[in-house]
Image (spheres, helix red, strand yellow):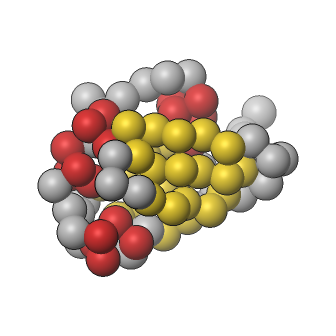
Amino acid sequence: MALFFRASATFDEDAMWLTLSDGRVLGVPLVWFPRLLNATPQQREAVEITPFGLHWEDLDEDISIPALLNGQRAA
């Protein structure tokens, strides 16, 4: 069974915050994702929310929401 997520993403200096459509809020340290950690705020904000995760075209970064919910970091 495929899972689809709706989310919004915001950032502070140290973390990415995801608010899921079911009301859960997930904070993820940026150190888990070096491309995001080293990105400018403008690059971080250029996120595309897909049914399965997050995508940053300019950073060549994709993050799975199910993986985040399981505590997985960038490979």
The spot of residue 67 in percent (x, y) is 51, 31
Which residue in the rendered view is the most extreme toward the right? 22
Q: Against 17, is 3 above or below?
A: above
| Residue 6 vs residue 32, the one in the foreground | 32
Image position of 56 with respect to 53: above or below: below
Q: Percent x, y for residue 12? A: 41, 57
**Which residue occupies the extreme left position in the image?**
38
In this view, 32 is above or below 37: above
Task: Name the residue: 20% across, 44% down.
Answer: 34
Residue at the front extreme, as displayed: 13
From the viewer's side, name the closer residue of 28 and 21.
28
Which residue is at 59% across, 51% downward?
18
Residue 36 picture location, percent across and down: 27, 53
At a point 59% along the width and 30% down the height, the residue shown is 69
Residue closer to the observer: 10 or 49: 10
User: Which sits in the foreground, 18 or 1?
Assistant: 18
Q: Quadrant of residue 57?
A: bottom left
In the rendering, at what x and y percent does residue 47 appear? 43, 68
Q: Which picture quadrant has residue 50?
A: bottom right
| Quadrant (top left, top right, bottom left, bottom right) of the C terminus | top left
Q: Is residue 67 above or below residue 62?
A: above
Quarter the N terminus occupies: top right
Q: How many marks?
A: 0
Q: Is residue 57 left or right of residue 21?
A: left
The part of the image, by quadrant, that contains residue 46 is bottom left
